[in-house]
Image (tube, grey):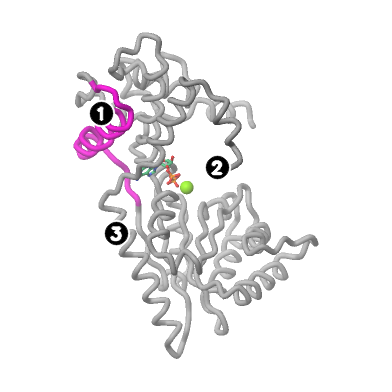
């Protein structure tokens, strides 16, 4: 598996146990109502595309999935796509690099189609090649993840050029293409700025968890499954309303971040010398600190004034203060 056999073989039982635990937690997917909505939207996106391609004025359609970082967009879309093998096979998947110009995005498309440009072509020629290759490879669907990377820091004329490039592909008579765009909420404003694009688009938003509305999901589903079922640990009296509230606050309610933090806390607990079968708030504090690089006084799981602490990444804060 992945050519990592030798490394796996060399693990002592403690490391192997940690590895198995990590695998078990990573594999699990939590299906919520939004997965159902996403599945329906994807079916609809396919159906309107197919109907349009069979009609007199073939053109593509756009589906956008937006949400905060860590909301779970990428994982949910991958999963929804793999449920429709015919779609998965005819979809070109690209992730916009960061930072990214329109030309670099074109090169990313080409590279994903197995065509690496050796020459530095100008932007419009790069996209001409993209159009040719989409048609030659019979690609009808394209998923661009992290689309905001293409929009970041662009002035109006550049954003208009990006939007025109997509519009040309969607409206191209000989070989129209449908897009699935995912990324931060800025993607939605981008689609709204051009009437012709907007008219062909639908947007699905992955909202945030919040306290107290999401208490049931966090306590009864996420904590219980990851800690008790996958981790084989007890929750003791940890899962109070206040703890759930801290967890929501520390993760800004992003579903994937909540899940990842609980997973890291399970691993912290398993390694803690005083561990006696029950996860504790100190394991969450440790997981949070090692991810954010914050002082104990800034740790939402330790501080009594936790609700006043802004859960931004203190490492990032430091970097931007240094002007990096
Ligand atoms: N429904 C889910 N079930 C299990 N894990 C999830 C789920 N949604 C997200 N995750 C995990 O949370 C993390 C962030 O999710 P990701 O899809 O990358 O978020 P986004 O693309 O919105 O930034 C990943 O580790 C992912 O595996
Ligand atoms: Mg993502």
Q: Residue at x 33, y 28 (%)?
A: 231
Q: Residue 40's spot in the image, x, y percent?
A: 30, 64
Identify the residue position indicated by label 3 in the image.
Answer: 37
Q: Earlier in the sequence, mark 3 or mark 2?
A: 2
The outermost residue toward the right is 119
Q: Residue 171's spot in the image, x, y percent?
A: 52, 78
Dots 1, 3 in contact, CB < 8 A: no
* Span highlighted in magenta in the image: 206-235
Q: Nearer the viewer, residue 189 or 299?
A: 299
Q: Residue at x 38, y 58 (%)?
A: 80
Circle 3: element type: helix
What whole-number distance in Å separates the C-alpha atoms at marks 1 and 2? Answer: 38 Å
Q: Earlier in the sequence, mark 1 or mark 2?
A: 2
Which label was assigned to residue 1?
Answer: 2
How many residues crowd mark 1 within 10 Å: few (<14), some (14–19), many (20+)?
Answer: many
Where in the image, quadrant-wise, is ligand 1 located? top left
- Residue 13 versus residue 255 in the image, above or below: above
Circle 1: element type: helix
Q: Residue 42's spot in the image, x, y percent?
A: 37, 65
Identify the residue position indicated by label 1 in the image.
Answer: 244
In the image: residue 247, left or right of residue 161: left
Circle 2: element type: loop
Which label was assigned to residue 236?
Answer: none
- Residue 57 versus residue 63 in the image, above or below: below
């Amino acid at each position: 598996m992945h050519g990592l056999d030798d490394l796996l073989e060399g693990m002592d039982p403690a490391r192997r146990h940690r590895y198995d635990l990590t695998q078990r937690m990573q594999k699990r997917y939590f299906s919520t109502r939004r997965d159902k909505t996403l599945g329906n939207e994807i079916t609809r996106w396919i159906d309107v595309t197919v109907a349009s391609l069979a009609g007199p004025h073939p053109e593509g359609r756009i589906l956008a999935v937006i949400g905060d970082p860590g909301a779970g967009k990428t994982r949910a879309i991958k999963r929804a796509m793999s449920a429709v093998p015919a779609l998965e096979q005819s979809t070109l998947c690209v992730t916009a690099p960061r930072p990214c110009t329109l030309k670099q995005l074109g090169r990313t498309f080409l590279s994903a189609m197995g065509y690496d440009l050796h020459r530095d072509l100008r932007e419009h020629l790069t996209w001409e090649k993209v159009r040719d290759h989409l048609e030659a490879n019979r690609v009808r669907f394209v998923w661009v993840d992290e689309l905001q990377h293409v929009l970041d820091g662009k002035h109006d004329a550049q954003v208009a050029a990006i939007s025109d490039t997509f519009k040309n592909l969607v409206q191209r008579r000989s070989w129209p293409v449908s897009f699935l765009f995912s990324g931060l909420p800025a993607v939605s404003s981008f689609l709204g700025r051009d009437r012709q694009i907007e008219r062909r688009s639908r947007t699905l938003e992955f909202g945030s968890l919040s306290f107290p509305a999401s208490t049931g999901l966090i306590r009864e589903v996420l904590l219980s499954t990851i800690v008790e079922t996958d981790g084989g640990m007890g929750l003791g009296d940890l899962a109070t309303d206040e703890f759930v509230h801290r967890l929501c606050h520390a993760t800004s309610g992003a579903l994937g971040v909540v899940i990842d933090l609980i997973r890291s806390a399970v691993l912290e607990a398993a390694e803690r010398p005083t561990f006696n079968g029950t996860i504790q708030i100190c394991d969450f504090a440790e997981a949070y600190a090692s991810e954010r690089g914050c002082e104990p006084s800034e740790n939402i799981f330790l501080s009594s004034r936790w609700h006043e602490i802004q859960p931004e990444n203190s490492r990032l804060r430091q970097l931007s203060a240094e002007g990096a």
